Amino acid sequence: MRLSDPRAQAVLAIACAVIPLLFVLWLRAAIVGLPLVLFFAGIAIATTFAGQIAGIFVLAVSVAAAVIAMRSPPLNFTLGLSLNGLVFIGGYAASALVVYLLAARQAALASREARQTQQVLVLSDALSRWLGRNARVAASLMRTMEDVDPGLLADVARERMLMTARVERLMRGQMTLEGGDLSSVMTDLCEEIIRAERRPDLHGEIAIAPMELDHEDFVRLCLVLADLLFLALREDPSSEEPLRISLTLEGSEAVLGLTWLRAGAPSWTADAHGVMTQRVAGRVARSLGGGLHWSARSPGRASSALRFPVHKGRGPAGGGAG
């Protein structure tokens, strides 16, 4: 595991350079290759545990030590900087470089695996909490609402659970990959939810401003989008205008907006789903430090939005549209 403290990394790099160097100086009368071989271990250790810069530092020190060894007695009377000595130095430098490259590649693979493992854990935790909240809110709705056909309540809960199952399956398949693209994931979420609603007449637009999100916020944003889009579709949007989804930066806030054309007043079923969305997606929004906003629930153009502050670490980066 790579050291996280820069001071510890520096100390390790210096130790990996100094300890073999001491053997080179103390044993310079011995076979020259014997003490220099210790640098191979130093290069590998420094690269693995202190980073590539530390590995390059130890590599440079080892090559300098090889040159010094060639110019110091008794080797300056045998190899020195003759053709044989230069061949030895070149061979050693090439060997040390190979050790560094192998160690750097192994460290990069280990770091990538660690990131992917962490992403899987973050995704699993967020999805588990989201699914649990949906289940609890559905159960609460069925307990607290009176004078309502139990069959209608059961249909609402079933529709909600089916939606969450589809979202979970899609996100687990896409968001544990290295460098997942927000535009692609959002587009696939929309296509999956709309396909499940059997509304081939609907079409939409997604516009994403360039921004950077850490993986945890990336997951939360997609969960809120799934909730908002599912609720919009329960309100039977008109196909005369496209559904529009946008993610923009407005000052110190990021805004995820969804707009559609509401054909008529929301039904009781849509209102029930609205209650669930406010409780579930609202909780996720608060974990982002923001909140949800809706337009008036009347026929015509409708909108919903998630607003959350742009913290340090979010900034310009690759974006896209779908």
Image: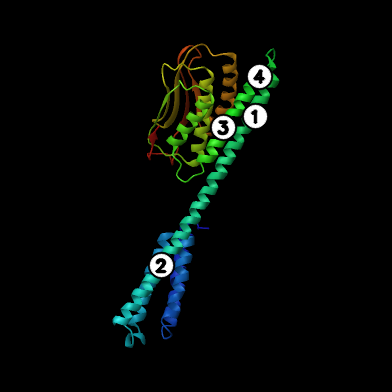
Quadrant in the picture for residue 25? bottom left
Earlier residue among tags 1 and 4: 1
CA gap, disc 2 and disc 4 = 66 Å
Earlier residue among tags 3 and 4: 4
Amino acid type, callout 3: Arg
Residue mark closest to the camera, 3 vs 2:
3
Earlier residue among tags 3 and 2: 2
**Coordinates of residue 224 in the picture (x, y in percent):** 52, 30
Amino acid type, callout 1: Ala
Q: Provide the residue designation for mark 2.
A: 98
Earlier residue among tags 2 and 4: 2
Q: Secondary structure at mark 3?
A: helix
| Circle number at residue 153 | 4
In contact (CB < 8 Å): disc 3 and disc 4? no
Q: Secondary structure at mark 4?
A: helix
Quadrant in the picture for residue 36? bottom left
> Is 2 left, or right, of 97 in this rendering?
right
Please tell me which residue is depicted at 47% across the width and 31% down the height of the picture. Answer: 308
| Circle number at residue 135 | 1
Amino acid type, callout 2: Val
In contact (CB < 8 Å): disc 1 and disc 2? no
CA gap, disc 3 and disc 1 = 15 Å
Q: Nearer the viewer, residue 262 or 50?
A: 262
Residue mark closest to the camera, 3 vs 4:
3
CA gap, disc 3 and disc 4 = 20 Å
| Circle number at residue 166 | 3
